[in-house]
Image (tube, rainbow, N blue to C red):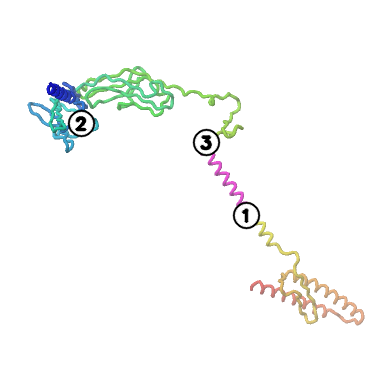
């Protein structure tokens, strides 16, 4: 009896494991030409069973070809026309779905997903699921317009966008129009998205888009018309100012006396000008100081050395101070004054002598004058020699 119960438990566990490892897929998948599609193939992982191999194959025109294989050595794409077009998730345990991009008409066929597991006692379990894929060219559907984050009522100066969304076989061409006067459409762009970086009041109006693809080039699908409005910016309390006859100065946070508000660039320029004015004033003061100092140094001393000149019978000149240089003009004036005084003395003497003796003193006067002129010429020559040296 106990053996029967144990056998029953083993059978139920085996059946339960097989149920957990069943593959799930889709019987039919419709693919759109030049679009992408995913063929589902999933299972529930079970403890004690490890996926050993995964294989995707296609059956078309009574022939079967392996597209994709995953084993211990990695992933391998074995059919060249599917290279760079198929992929299988790696980071999702239990997900063996096949993703195909850029569908072509020859991609239609029967796709089989096969998974082999290995148990702890090295026994193998194989499961597979088949999906029929039909790739067709689909004409583009009627597009819909999707507004941006701010909707269809956008404040002036903000960024806005309108997107034209359509379904069908690519490539799909897009054309954006704005309703002009008379109901005619003004072409604005040929992209799926119409963007305004800074919306202006003149951009408000009625818009629509048209789409078409290569399935039926004569069929053009047009979207419904939407109205885009531009809202004025809200007026803040600071912007509201009483209207007066005199211009009102802006008040900054640092100075509440009513000086015009300046930006950082203007303040920097003013500081630079102030530094230049201070520098120029300092240089000007230094120049004035140097000029005054030079004039003061160039002035002659008030107390000049005194030269005393005496005339003798030998016509020699005695200079009392030989270390100080006296200008010729000064010495000449001194000599002339001394000469005139000597001449007056001689004249008086001669007059007295004439009154007594009756003789003429004219020769004596001429002799004194000659001596004076000789002495002046000698002094001037001496000054010129000193200057030359």
Q: Nearer the viewer, mark 2 or mark 3?
A: 2
At 22% across and 33% down in the image, what residue appears? 90
* Identity of the residue drawn at 52% across and 38% down: 264
**Dot label at residue 88:** 2
* Left or right position of 118 against 332: left
Please tell me whether the stretch drawn in magenta is mainly helix, strand or loop: helix
Mark sitting earlier along the chain (3/1): 3
Q: Position of residue 121 (x, y in %)?
A: 14, 32
Q: Quadrant of residue 195?
A: top left
Magenta stretch in the rendered image: 262-284
Q: Is residue 33 left or right of residue 362?
A: left
Kindly identify which residue carries mark 3. Answer: 263
Which numbered disc, 1 or 2, marks the residue closer to the eye? 2
Category of crowding for the residue at label 1, using alpha-carbon neighbours closer than 10 angstroms: few (below 14), some (14–19), many (at least 20): few
Residue 135 can be seen in this image: no
Q: Is residue 281 magenta?
A: yes
x then y, percent, for residue 385: 66, 74
Q: Secondary structure at mark 1?
A: helix
Q: Is residue 132 above or below residue 358?
A: above
**Mark 3 vs mark 1, CA separation in Å:** 37 Å
Label of residue 63 in the image: none
Residue 297 in the image, given as x and y percentages of width and height: 68, 61
* In the rendered image, the vertical position of residue 360 relative to residue 86, given as above or below: below
Q: Which residue is mark 1?
A: 287
Specify few, some or many for label 3: CA neighbours under 10 Å numbering under 14, 14-19, or 20 or more. Answer: few
Q: Circle 3 — which element?
A: loop
Quarter containing the C terminus? bottom right
Between 140 and 133, the one nearer to me in the picture:
133
Would you say the residues marked 2 and 3 are in contact, meaning their CB atoms lie under 8 Å apart?
Answer: no
Q: Is residue 123 left or right of residue 233?
A: left
Residue 223 locus on image (x, y percent): 30, 19
């Amino acid at each position: 009896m106990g053996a029967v119960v144990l056998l029953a438990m083993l059978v139920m566990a085996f059946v339960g494991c097989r149920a957990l490892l069943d593959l799930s897929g889709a019987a039919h998948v419709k693919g759109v030409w030049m679009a992408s599609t995913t063929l589902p193939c999933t299972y529930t992982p079970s403890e004690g069973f490890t996926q050993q191999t995964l294989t995707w194959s296609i059956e078309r025109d009574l022939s079967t070809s392996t597209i994709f294989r995953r084993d211990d050595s990695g992933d391998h794409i074995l059919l060249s026309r599917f290279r760079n077009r198929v992929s299988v998730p790696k980071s999702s345990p239990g997900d063996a779905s096949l993703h195909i991009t850029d569908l072509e008409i020859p991609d239609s066929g029967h796709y089989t997903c096969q998974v082999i597991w290995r148990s702890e006692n090295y026994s193998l379990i194989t499961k597979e699921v088949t999906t029929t894929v039909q790739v067709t060219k689909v004409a583009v559907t009627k597009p819909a317009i999707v507004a941006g984050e701010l909707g269809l009522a956008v404040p002036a100066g903000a960024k806005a966008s309108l997107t034209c969304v359509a379904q069908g076989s690519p490539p799909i061409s897009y054309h954006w129009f704005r309703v002009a006067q008379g109901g005619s459409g003004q072409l604005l762009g040929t992209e799926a998205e119409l963007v305004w970086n800074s919306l202006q009041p003149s951009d408000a109006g009625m818009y629509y888009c048209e789409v078409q693809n290569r399935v039926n080039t004569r069929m053009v699908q047009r979207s419904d018309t939407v109205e885009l409005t531009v809202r004025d910016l809200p007026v803040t309390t600071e912007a509201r100012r009483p209207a007066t006859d005199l211009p009102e100065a802006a008040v900054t946070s640092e100075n509440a006396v009513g000086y015009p508000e300046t930006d950082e660039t203007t303040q920097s320029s003013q500081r630079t000008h102030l530094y230049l004015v201070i520098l120029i004033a300092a240089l000007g003061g230094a120049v004035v100081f140097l000029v005054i100092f030079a004039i003061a140094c160039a002035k002659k001393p008030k107390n000049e050395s005194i030269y005393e000149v005496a005339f003798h019978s030998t016509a020699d000149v005695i200079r009392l101070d030989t270390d100080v240089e006296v200008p010729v003009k000064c010495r000449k004036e001194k000599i002339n004054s001394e000469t005139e005084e000597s001449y007056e003395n001689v004249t008086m003497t001669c007059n007295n002598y004439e009154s007594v003796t009756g003789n003429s003193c004219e020769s004596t006067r001429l002799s004194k004058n000659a001596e004076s002129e000789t002495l002046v010429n000698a002094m001037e020559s001496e000054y010129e020699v000193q200057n030359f040296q």
